[in-house]
Amino acid sequence: MRGMKLGGRTTMKVRTYGRHFKEGSKNLVRNGWMTFASISAVTVMLLVVGAFLAVIMNINHFADSLEEDVEIRVFIDRDAETSEQDNLEENIDTLSGVDTIDYIPRDEGLEDFIDSLGDEGDYFESLREENPLNDVFVVNAENPEQTDRLAADIEGMDHVENLEYGQDIFEQLFSATDFIRIAGIVLIAGLLFTAIFLIANTIKLTIIARKTEIGIMKLVGATNSFIRWPFFIEGLLLGILGSILPIAALTYGYDQLYHAIGERTGLDFFEFLPPYPMLLQISVLLVVTGAVVGVWGSLMSVRKFLKV
Amino acid sequence: MIQMQDVWKTYPNGVMAINGMTIHIDSGEFVYIVGSSGAGKSSFIKMLYREEKPTRGEIFIDDKKLADYKERHIPYLRRNMGVVFQDFKLLPGLTVFENIAFALEVIEEKKDEIKRRVMQVLDIVRLKNKARFYPHELSGGEQQRVAIARAIVNNPSVLIADEPTGNLDPDTSWEIMHILEEINDRGTTVLMATHNREIVNSMRKRVIAIEGGRIARDEVRGTYNNES
């Protein structure tokens, strides 16, 4: 006769994990439609999360690239003489924090402008006779943060008609990013709860269907954690299976988009993030999110139903 | 060894099931628990395997206080006792072999060991040839034998049977009784709640009669009723 074992918690054995895995996946098949509904909920949620992430990452990347080359375009007074232009350049050069100064004569500027328009540029050929553009200094700051100060200093100098720098785009971009972030978070939170709720319900069905079995398990001395494991795995599988389709769709979709856009000219100011490693990062995040949501849902219903 | 010291059980709905019970059962005993429905037999049995907790008093099994078991240690208590019910409680989707092996799987026994022990208990309940059958392919008596096999496959020190012959015809009931007696002969304490007068009177053992939640009678080699 064996003595009574008080406590003596032994760690779970490998073959036991195998059993739990088998049981957990059996439950998925047994619950058929609820499994399908749960996986679909996770799929929809992760699709939105994935798309949202791709957009946010691209916007951040865009913001970074803007920040990297914030340049000030100084439009020189059209009346300024060459010597006066040279003076201006020297004055700018003496400012601290100036990295480079490029001079773009107005003829070259017009040329670039017409070229950039492609076929439509033909309509502007007539402008060559009376160029409306100014000569321009393109000033680059050593440091993006200095742009504001440099712009203010340059603006006060003689023969500066006007200047232009990325300030406006910046502000617009950031307010747009904020909006997208908030909208995305609200949407994702809603979908997250739906997914967790559906998973919890699926697992609840399993638990109800297996009530007798659980009762017998308890009777013959199964520990609570032993009883919980298959449900835990069922939830985990629901979450991970739900992440497959979003990852595939996102990988394919983004790749197509990247190549389609990449082949078009004229959008060179906005550069998409290359698919790798961004898609890999997003995929990992989606699998993890799916798994967490699945486990969370399963723990929610198991805790309620397995009170012993 | 099972001991109860002044045990009371009142359910939250006010039903007073057990009202001051003191009992001592030695290892290796065979005890019938008799009494009419509602006398408190079920509560008595449920407290033994810790399905219910006493409201007052102490229960000891093998010198260990049940009250000292933390919730998470109860599984280990149950591994040391087998429980058999009137309705067998077999899993319909599993074969005879799997149903018995189930009790060993949940305590994470090795595969070879599971096979050896299951075949051993199948021999005791004389169902070796039906290992691959499903419960619905068996008679009631055979199903109860499977349930008994599952209850003893852990080598428990105590076997608790709650009206094990309640659903069986007289001949089959005797089959079950012989098996229980055999298990008892191997040293396992057997506690059997029953309404079966004929069995209690023919196979004489200790009888504990419960009435109104108290012990009305406790006799060695007793009978179902007082007068006989």
Image (spheres, rainbow, N blue to C red):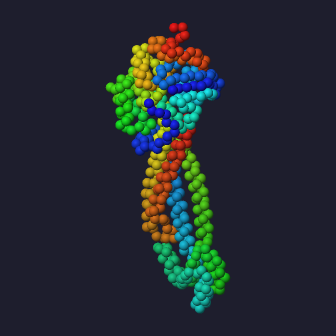
Residue, far left: B129
Image vertical order of residue B181 relative to residue A254, above or below: above
Indicate the position of residue A99 as horizontal and vertical percent values: 56, 81
Residue drawn at x 59%, y 28% as measured from the top left: B58
Residue drawn at x 44%, y 51% as measured from the top left: A244
Image vertical order of residue B12 relative to residue A187, above or below: above
Residue drawn at x 43%, y 54% as measured from the top left: A248
Q: Evaluate whether residue A165 shows in this view.
A: no
Quadrant including the N terminus of chain A: top left
Q: How many marks?
A: 0
**Residue placed most toward the observer, B196 or B20:** B20
Image vertical order of residue A83 relative to residue B186, above or below: below
Residue, far right: A156
**Residue placed most toward the observer, B167 or A83:** B167
Indicate the position of residue B108 as horizontal and vertical percent values: 43, 38
Q: Is residue A298 left or right of residue B137?
A: right
Residue drawn at x 54%, y 38% as measured from the top left: B72
Image vertical order of residue A65 relative to residue B173, above or below: below
Indicate the position of residue A135 as horizontal and vertical percent values: 57, 83
Q: Which of the 4 quarters of the picture holds residue A308?
A: top right
Indicate the position of residue A4 as horizontal and vertical percent values: 49, 34
**Residue placed most toward the observer, B19 or A193:** B19
Q: Is residue A111 left or right of residue A157?
A: left
Q: Evaluate whether residue A147 shows in this view.
A: yes
Q: Which of the 4 quarters of the picture holds residue A23?
A: top left
Residue, far bottom: A83
